[in-house]
Amino acid sequence: MNAKTEAVEFRLDGLKWLVIIALIIGGAVANSYYSAEFPVLYRVLALVAVGGVACFIAINTAKGYSFWELLKAAQIEIRKVVWPTRQETIQTTLIVVAVVFVAALILWGLDAFFGYLASMIIG
């Protein structure tokens, strides 16, 4: 295999994180400051836009890029999962319900027995 992997180079990560923090704080302050002047819909749309810009900048940092790669790898792993059929799910659920019911009966019986013993001892 002759696969070339390009090393992604990240520059000014500290400055990018400062810009992200400034965007988030600025969005929160602007949302509070303009709460009486603009409807909620416009403020929410503005916050979503600011959040999108902050996410875009974050993905262009080393940590953001590794997080993005982790999300892509997780999506690939989810595709590999063999999900149970409907019948298997129903059978497993019924088994769990039956075991919980039997355990509840045992605990109820033990509680009644020890309660009876305690009442006989206490008088």
Image (cartoon, rainbow, N blue to C red):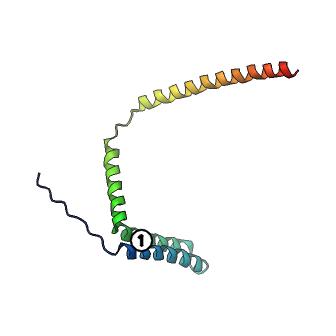
Q: Across the whole image, how many numbered discs are drawn on residues?
A: 1
Give the residue drawn at x 31%, y 74%: 11
88 with respect to 43 (left or right): left
Q: Nearer the viewer, residue 102 or 11?
A: 11
Residue at (75, 21) in percent of width and height: 114
Residue at 36% in and 63% down:
63
Quadrant of the frame with the C terminus: top right
Q: Indicate whether 51 appears above or below 115.
A: below
Query: What residue is pinned by disc 1?
Result: 54
Q: Is residue 59 above or below residue 110?
A: below
Q: Position of residue 70 (x, y in %)?
A: 34, 55
Q: Where is residue 103, by image quadrant?
A: top right
Q: From the viewer's perspective, tell me whether residue 123 is left or right of residue 105.
A: right
Q: Position of residue 2 (x, y in %)?
A: 11, 55
Q: Which residue corresponds to the image point at 70% horizontal and 21% vertical from the top-left?
A: 110
Q: Residues within 10 Å of mark 1 (few under 14, many from 20)?
A: some
Task: Give the residue type that dot 1 points to.
Answer: Ala
Tell me if 82 is positioned left or right of 43 in this view.
left
State the residue lying farthest toward the right.
123
Between 66 and 112, the one lying in front of the other is 66
- Classify mark 1: helix, strand or loop: helix
Tell me where residue 104 sits by quadrant: top right
